[in-house]
């Protein structure tokens, strides 16, 4: 496509066709997001000014981004941001892209902690930091720890905390969990990797070719991390403290058994908006 004198609408038509041919799920929406982001304008703006000529250097950038998306690189890795729980998080290919299902875990935790005088919270495998940051921001008097085994993920998570004005989180490069100042937790939260290793190769190229393998791979049945966390969490929880984790499709029965086997009570399962059991929680003691 010759670059000079292109309008927004010509770029949208070109991009929509190219992304459709590349079998991207939402070609027009993705084209709009990339063009809006490159121009620093809203979707309303590009709709209302579709015949506006785009400056050449922006056209070059947009064509480069469209090319990347047509190779199935996810939009948030191209733009560097993803909206979650009403906030914009910085995202790089070192972290899992936040999924809307995880908003359920966050709102469940916030509701559970509302009204407490103070709350001690752990987010295990924090990735971009979404869970820890939302809870730290929306739960008054909360002290949060966020852990990950990836130092690059922790860098992104602490950058996000700073950018979003949250200063009540401590970040730790550890496997699973550690106590905060010998303090036990009111709630331990996690969205661990939960894709069975065998199924990774069936994932869309957008996911398997771009998202961090360690953030996706849950071991032979997808539940390696759940198994370890459910076994370890009770010693870190206050009496009647809660563990709440995200799970994948068809994992609720097995994870329910793990919770009850580890002595958790009041076990609850929450469905997502596709009616898939997605969050499971239990209390100790
Ligand atoms: N907690 C982060 C998220 O929910 C990272 C999860 C992960 O890397 N598996 O996006």
Image (tube, rainbow, N blue to C red):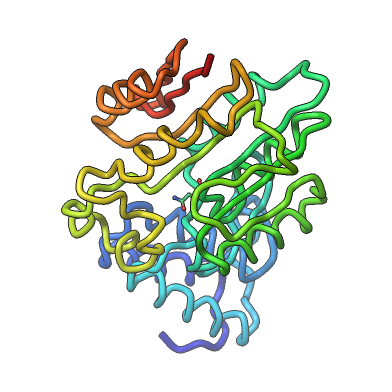
Q: Nearer the viewer, residue 39 or 153?
A: 153
Q: Is residue 222 above or below residue 239?
A: below
Extreme residue in the top direction: 266
209 sits to left or right of 152:
left
- Residue for point 34% across, 65% down: 19
Residue 20: x and y in percent read: 30, 61
In this view, the residue in front, 202 or 253, is: 253
Q: Residue 186: horizontal and vertical position, in percent?
A: 65, 26
* Nearer to me, 7 or 223: 223
Question: In which image quadrant can residue 235 be found?
Answer: top right
Quadrant location of residue 279? top left
| Left or right for 160, reference 43 | right
Examine the rendered structure and indicate whether residue 26 appears above or below residue 118.
below
**Where residue 177 sits in the image (x, y, percent)?**
55, 46
Q: Is residue 248 visible?
A: yes
In the displayed structure, does residue 174 sit left or right of residue 199? Answer: right
Determine the residue positioned at 71% across, 41% down: 144
Which of the image's four quarters has the N terminus?
bottom left
Q: Quadrant of residue 141?
A: top right
């Amino acid at each position: 496509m010759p670059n000079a004198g292109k309008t927004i609408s010509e770029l949208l038509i070109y991009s929509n066709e190219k992304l459709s041919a590349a079998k991207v799920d939402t070609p027009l929406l993705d084209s709009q997001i990339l063009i809006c982001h490159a121009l620093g304008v809203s979707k309303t703006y590009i709709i209302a000014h579709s015949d506006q000529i785009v400056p050449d250097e922006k056209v070059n950038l947009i064509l480069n981004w469209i090319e990347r998306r047509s190779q199935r690189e996810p939009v948030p890795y191209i733009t560097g941001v993803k909206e979650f729980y009403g906030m914009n998080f910085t995202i790089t290919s070192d972290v899992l892209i936040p999924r809307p299902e995880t908003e359920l875990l966050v709102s469940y935790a916030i509701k559970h902690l509302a009204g407490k005088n103070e709350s001690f919270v752990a987010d295990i495998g924090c990735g971009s930091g979404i869970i820890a940051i939302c809870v730290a921001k929306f739960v008054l008097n909360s002290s949060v720890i966020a852990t990950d085994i990836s130092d690059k993920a922790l860098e992104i998570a602490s950058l996000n905390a700073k950018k979003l004005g949250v200063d009540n989180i401590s970040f730790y490069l550890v496997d699973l969990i550690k106590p905060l100042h010998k303090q036990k937790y009111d709630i331990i939260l996690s969205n661990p990797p939960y894709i069975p290793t065998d199924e990774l190769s069936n994932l869309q190229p957008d996911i398997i070719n771009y998202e961090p393998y360690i953030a996706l791979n849950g071991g032979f049945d997808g539940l390696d991390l759940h198994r370890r966390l459910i076994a370890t969490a009770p010693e870190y929880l206050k009496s009647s403290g809660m563990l709440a984790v995200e799970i994948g499709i068809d994992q609720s029965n097995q994870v329910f058994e793990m919770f009850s086997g580890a002595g958790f009570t009041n076990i609850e399962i929450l469905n997502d908006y596709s009616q898939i059991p997605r969050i499971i929680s239990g209390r100790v003691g």
